[in-house]
Amino acid sequence: MQNFECTMNNCGSEEIVEAANIAISNLLPTKSRSLYDIAYNRFKKWCAEKNVQVYSENVLLAYFSENAKNYKSSTLFYG
């Protein structure tokens, strides 16, 4: 998972930094984290194969469109 750590340089006061870092660490439920990490790593691998350097809506649409060719719609979430 990408690290979006909040620091004094990008978030402001120490209180804001601490609150933001706690919120970031709790974004994903423990139960779902491993599935998220697997899906995210597949996406990053696909981006590397396609030489994608900047993530955008168009990149996500292309990724999902390509996956839709290989998976049934009912299982696409897990692909």
Image (cartoon, rainbow, N blue to C red):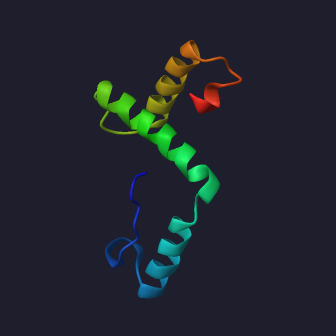
Report which quarter residue 9 is drawn in.
bottom left
Residue occupying the point 42% across, 85% down: 13
Residue 3 lies, with reference to residue 18, above or below; the image says above
Q: Residue 42, how many percent across, how many down?
A: 44, 34
Residue occupying the point 40% across, 70% down: 6
Q: Residue 28, how many percent across, how many down?
A: 59, 57
- Is 40 or 7 nearer to us in this picture? 40
Report which quarter residue 53 is drawn in.
top left
Residue occupying the point 55% across, 70% down: 23
Residue lying farthest right? 74
Residue 12 lies, with reference to residue 72, above or below; the image says below
Residue 30 lies, with reference to residue 32, above or below; the image says below
Residue occupying the point 50% across, 73% down: 20
Q: Residue 47, how many percent across, how many down?
A: 36, 31
Report which quarter residue 14 is drawn in.
bottom left
Tell me if 47 is positioned left or right of 32 in this view: left
Tell me if 22 is positioned left or right of 48 in this view: right
Residue 45 lies, with reference to residue 18, above or below; the image says above
**Quadrant of the drawing holding the C terminus:** top right
- Is 36 or 23 nearer to us in this picture? 36
